[in-house]
Amino acid sequence: AQTVTQSQPEMSVQEAETVTLSCTYDTSENNYYLFWYKQPPSRQMILVIRQEAYKQQNATENRFSVNFQKAAKSFSLKISDSQLGDTAMYFCAFMKETSGSRLTFGEGTQLTVNP
Amino acid sequence: DSGVTQTPKHLITATGQRVTLRCSPRSGDLSVYWYQQSLDQGLQFLIQYYNGEERAKGNILERFSAQQFPDLHSELNLSSLELGDSALYFCASSGGGVNNEQFFGPGTRLTVL
């Protein structure tokens, strides 16, 4: 079974600064996908970024980028130029590379962006 | 807006009762997933349906059941409710193939009193 661990329950950052959220996972699979989801106070689950394990290049989406270290089973999210709207719970998630696989989530990190 | 709809948004009921949560997937998506988000268990996968058939089961209690209908909407039935069943229940849908993103609905907030 896969496990996902987020060791930072809460983090805070000043507006316009950069913050990094950590995630580690455990799996015996070689091919899989990793995701970061954002859950703002509205409770909607929003996909922030995804990474395919077979790709060596780290994924980027505007101000969001990841540092994917496959051997270390580490998948951190970097948010640059933090904005007040980035305040949310962030979940790291794992999915096996098989058709219609479930998502396995970490415990979440509550990020607060301060003005 | 993800295109996934869930009804009702909020549900308040008493212990021992039975409720039904409804989910309509995005147009064309064949797979529906149910997840439960609670304070003590976090976000966990309950069950998945693909084109009307059960595809995978997670940590779903025997008191809970689900089905997917021919029009692809899905229902999650929760019976003999306990206080600990209070949670946010999400439905997500995807095309069902490999490398398909799951799109989440807004969730149903269930409160058991």
Image: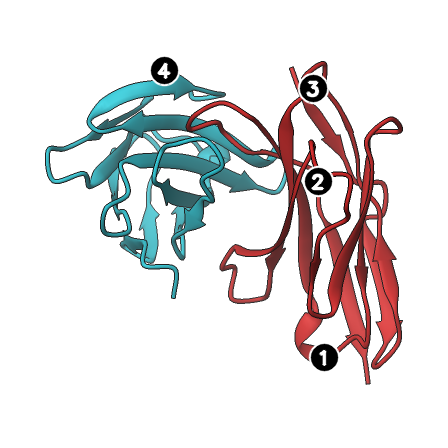
Chain colours: A red, B cyan
Q: Chain of mark 1?
A: A
Query: What residue sits right under mark 4 in the picture?
Result: B62
Who is closer to the viewer here, B61 or B13? B61
Binning the other alpha carbons within 10 Å of mark 3 as few (below 14), some (14 to 19) or many (20 upward) gives few
Asked which quadrant contains residue A32, the reply is top right
Query: What residue sits right under mark 2 in the picture?
Result: A107
Is A49 above or below relative to A53?
below
Marks 3,2: beta carbons within 8 A: no
Identify which amino acid the numbered label 2 is placed on: Glu
Query: What residue sits right under mark 1 in the picture?
Result: A84
Q: Quick one: label 3 or label 2, which is nearer the N terminus?
A: 3
Residue A3, x across and y down, in percent: 71, 25
| In the displayed structure image, the side of residue B50 where residue A63 appears, left or right | right
Mark 4 lies on a secondary structure that is loop
Marks 1,4: beta carbons within 8 A: no
Identify which amino acid the numbered label 4 is placed on: Glu
Residue at left offset 37%, top offset 41%: B94
Residue at left offset 39%, top offset 26%: B47
Residue A7, x across and y down, in percent: 85, 41
Identify which amino acid the numbered label 1 is placed on: Leu
Which disc, if any, is residue A96?
none
Q: Chain of mark 3?
A: A
Marks 1,3: beta carbons within 8 A: no
Tag 1 and tag 4 share a subunit: no
Residue at left offset 71%, top offset 52%: A59
| In the displayed structure image, the side of residue B86 where residue A114 appears, left or right | right
Query: What residue sits right under mark 3 in the picture?
Result: A30
Residue at left offset 29%, top offset 55%: B5
Tag 1 and tag 2 share a subunit: yes
Who is closer to the viewer here, B85 or B25? B25
